Image (spheres, grey):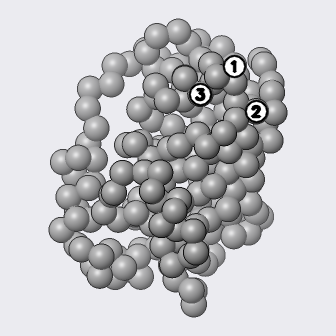
Amino acid sequence: MAKSDKLSDKHCIFIQQQPLFFVATAGKDSRVNLSPKGLDSLRIINPNRIMWLNLSGSGNETAAHLLDVNRMTLMFCAFEGAALILRVYGQASILHPRDDGWNEALSNFPEVAGSRQIFDMTIDLVQTSCGTGVPVMSFVKSRAEKELLPFYEEMGPEGVEKYWARKNVKSIDGHATGIFNDD
């Protein structure tokens, strides 16, 4: 197990090769949430900072947790090639479409219907482990292009906000997510 306080060039190359990563968060009085993320939604800003574009979904746990405790863990694991697990620990802040700086931050990503938040993570620990317990699996295709993205494109911006109001205002533990100014 190797540890560092920042991403190396080798770590950055590994991260950029992964079609999938996982994000974990927990509030003080909430369940731990672990979510898979994909698409072209993650950017390494520098060796101590990662941003990722969060798309709309059926829940909004990460945002609720970060309002309570701003810690986050990202995990990347090799399903192809040499075995490796890379965990990135840090503190994260939330940027919403209503916030100053949203358009500038969003310019780092492709335009995607249903873009909900950008999480900006300051890294304090990077840890690798062997990953030999992770199975070898081939990436076949992303489901997002045919399922997720058209779902939000067809809703349009007003429909997406209505969806947020139904599905994204509270976490599964009943905590506010901050999706709107008044929640």
Mark 2 to mark 1 CA distance (whole Å): 16 Å
Count of all numbered marks drawn on residues in the image? 3
Packing grade of label 3 (10 A; few <14, some 14-19, many >=20) is: some
Residue 85 placement, left or right of 53: right
Is tag 1's residue or tag 3's residue first in the polypeptide sequence?
3
Question: Is there CB contact under 8 Å for labels 2 and 3?
Answer: no
Eye-nearest disc, 1 or 3 = 3
Q: Position of residue 136 (x, y in %)?
A: 43, 14
Identified at 47% across, 59% down, the residue is 106
Residue matched to label 1: 129
Residue matched to label 2: 6
Q: Is residue 82 above or below residue 70?
A: above
Of the residues shown, which amino acid type is indicated by label 3? Cys
Asked if residue 69 can be seen in this view, the reply is yes
Q: Is residue 131 above or below residue 153?
A: above
Identified at 70% across, 35% down, the residue is 47
Identified at 27% across, 54% down, the residue is 148
Packing grade of label 2 (10 A; few <14, some 14-19, many >=20) is: some
Of the residues shown, which amino acid type is indicated by label 1? Ser
Q: Which mark is residue 64?
A: none
Residue 106 placement, left or right of 47: left
Is tag 2's residue or tag 1's residue first in the polypeptide sequence?
2
Residue matched to label 3: 12
Q: Position of residue 131 (x, y in %)?
A: 60, 17
